[in-house]
Amino acid sequence: MQKIFDTHLHLWNLQECPISWVNSYKELNQNFDFNQAIKEYKDFEFLGAMYVETNSDNKDKEALFALKLKKLYGLKLCLADLKHKEEICAFREVMHTSFKGAKRLFETDFKELVKILEKAQIVFEACLKNSELIFLEKFLRDNSNLKVVLDHMGSPDINCFDGYKKDLQRLKKFSNFYIKLSSPDHFSMQTSQEFIFELFSFLKENFSEDRFLFGSNYPVSKLSPNKWANLILKSEVFENLDAIFYQNALKIYKGG
């Protein structure tokens, strides 16, 4: 049975931490706990996970909630602020829903934040729109010592796949750049399996397998963790499955 570490797990208790954006999604407007998540991996040997911030309404309440999960279940943490930087191994500020978008990467206060990440050896999780990947080349060039993980493979869109490929090819020269094989929000059972496999093949052709990390994006993804992980296996694109499914993650996310 394939061992697996989920680098992109969302959990929430809406009574403890408000998340207003879930009000627009009936299937997400409920609580999701760690024990539910574990049951999603019936075909795998579940090793653990990293809790990823949820773009909540209150960062302080979310941090307290996440710290409790860390204590209970040994989760690694990716939070949206650095008040508890000694407890986290990754930082994420959602940009794909922000009106500033990827331009946020170059604002003065964000540059100062990046300095803290570098010094503390905390990974930066880049959550960008497909159309904004072009901004990453300059950011990576300016911050060559920062480990950067691209969430959801950069949310590729089948309708502009050629542009996506050109943007990603410009990033393969950066040794501290990694790609999270986490299911994008818009992927579903209706997404072409042929396209998903073509996407995997493109990534494998351009990046070594020590650059990939498995993530589920549970419960936001419309594909279950078990289904998504099995799609990766079914594609037969990747060779070092242990590296992709858990070893790379345990090497990259060391802190916290």
Image (cartoon, grey):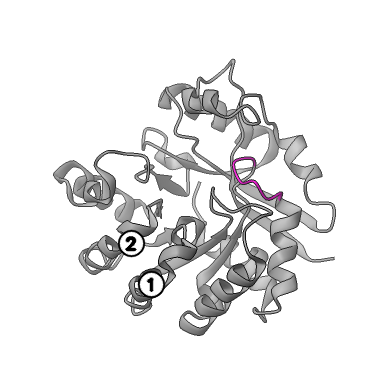
Q: What residue is drawn where x is 46% and y is 57%?
A: 155
Q: Is residue 165 above or below residue 20?
A: below
As shown in the figure, which amino acid type bears the numbered disc 2? Leu
197 sits to left or right of 86: right
Q: Residues within 10 Å of mark 2 (few under 14, many from 20)?
A: many
Q: Residues within 10 Å of mark 1 (few under 14, many from 20)?
A: many
The percent coordinates of residue 148 (x first, y second) are 39, 61
Is 221 included in the stretch rendered in magenta? yes
Which one is nearer the viewer's eye here, 111 or 28?
28
9 sits to left or right of 131: right
Q: What residue is drawn where x is 67% and y is 56%?
A: 5
The percent coordinates of residue 152 (x first, y second) are 50, 56
- Which of marks 2 and 1 precedes in the sequence? 2
Q: What residue is drawn where x is 70% and y is 31%?
A: 33
Which one is nearer the viewer's eye here, 255 or 214?
214
Mark 1 touches mark 2? (CB < 8 Å):
yes
For label 2, the SS is loop
Instruction: Read off the residue under disc 2.
Output: 133
Instruction: Read off the residue under disc 1.
Output: 168
Q: CA distance from mark 1 to mark 2?
A: 8 Å
Which one is nearer the viewer's eye here, 201 or 16?
201
Image quarter where the N terminus lies is bottom right
Q: Is residue 236 visible?
A: yes
Q: Is residue 67 above or below residue 153?
A: above
Q: What residue is drawn where x is 57% and y is 76%?
A: 198
As shown in the figure, which amino acid type bears the numbered disc 1? Leu
Q: Which picture quadrant has residue 81?
A: top left
Is 189 included in the stretch rendered in magenta? no
Q: Which residues are magenta?
A: 219-224
